[in-house]
Amino acid sequence: MKRAGFVALIGEPNAGKSTLTNRMVGAKVSIVTHKVQTTRARIRGVAIEGESQIVFVDTPGLFRPRRRLDRAMVAAAWGGAADADIVVLMVEAHRGITEGVEAILEGLEEIAQGRKVALAINKIDMVKSEKLLGLAQDLNSRYDFVETFMISAEKGHGAEHLRAWLAAELPEGPWLYPEDQIADLPLRMIAAEMTREKLTLRLHQELPYQLTVETEKWEERKDGSARVDQLIYVMRDGHKGIVLGKGGETIKAVSTAARAELTEFLGRKVHLFLQVKVRPNWLEESERYSEMGLDFKDGNT
Ligand SMILES: Nc1nc2c(ncn2[C@@H]2O[C@H](COP(=O)(O)OP(=O)(O)OP(=O)(O)O)[C@@H](O)[C@H]2O)c(=O)[nH]1
Ligand SMILES: [Mg+2]
């Protein structure tokens, strides 16, 4: 019997939601870095398990938002949970029940309403197994999870078990996407995200949080290759200098890494052109939000 539905992965920034999404899908559809607040919008990745089509909804981390962008991100994350058939809360094994996790548990009470909520304790590769049972009990005493999983999204422990469980719990019904589709995200956005990942990995401190990347032009060439032009918006002249790097070496390295990844993803040659633009107010421009897949109005208040 065919089954299909949405599984939202929620949790604090850095919990491993995007890593798990990619593992479940079997391809990199969502960017991953060691820094917090990497994912900015909902990213849908599609996995098939037996007769079930599981649409994983990777969400931005939940934290106490300050900027308009932060508020829009957090709203997108809760929205993802509210629209899902099943919600999986991811908690980092070595960090345990932080203030952030407590705040999420409170929020869950409100949005869960009849939805199945499962717990996935992630990064079990980082702690002694004796610690896990206590953490699982503690979390289950605070919220009535339908099931608890111990996983390592990165190493793969427990991932198959979780996927099989999700596949069986989804409602019966026709599949939502064609069989060969792995992500529900325009290519131009995937490409922009790849570049943003490389920038985030190379740039320090606050800079990754003060830039955005957009694919401006996508041209299919007769020889089968693609020409992709992207804009990197930064807020200050000084930031532009840092993104470019001495003699342009930073932007060159970013471009090389992003192009390699996009080439592999598409399976054909890519010409990638990056341009940095200073735009002091981009965080307050609604068009930047729609390009990211966020709702500008969610950032109000
Ligand atoms: N050791 C270990 N590291 C992990 C595991 N899962 C994820 N990570 C690492 O944790 C960091 C954050 O992973 P992400 O998948 O980007 O986390 P996220 O929850 O999507 O983070 P945001 O998008 O910022 O909300 C990365 O450095 C991952 O490699 C795991 O099971 N074990
Ligand atoms: Mg993420």
Image: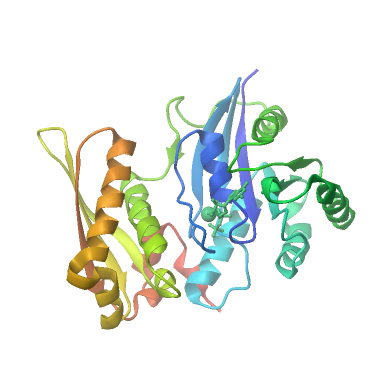
Q: Give the position of the N terminus as an image quadrant.
A: top right
Q: How is the image coloured?
A: rainbow
301 horizontally vs 254: left or right: right
Query: Where does residue 166 sit, x and y in percent of width and height?
Result: 68, 33
Name of the residue lying farthest toward the top? 1
Query: Where does residue 37 sit, x and y in percent of width and height?
Result: 52, 63
Q: Nearer the viewer, residue 245 or 106?
A: 245
Which residue: 76% across, 59% down? 96
Q: Image quadrant of residue 255?
A: bottom left
86 horizontally vs 189: left or right: right
Q: Image quadrant of residue 54?
A: top right
Query: Where does residue 68 sit, x and y in percent of width and height?
Result: 49, 75
Q: Give the position of the C terminus as an image quadrant.
A: bottom right
Query: Where does residue 121 sit, x and y in percent of width and height?
Result: 73, 48
Which residue: 44% across, 39% down? 183
74 horizontally vs 29: left or right: right
Which residue: 61% across, 43% down? 153
Q: Can residue 278 be seen here?
A: no
293 horizontally vs 224: left or right: right
As drawn, 127 above or below 75: above
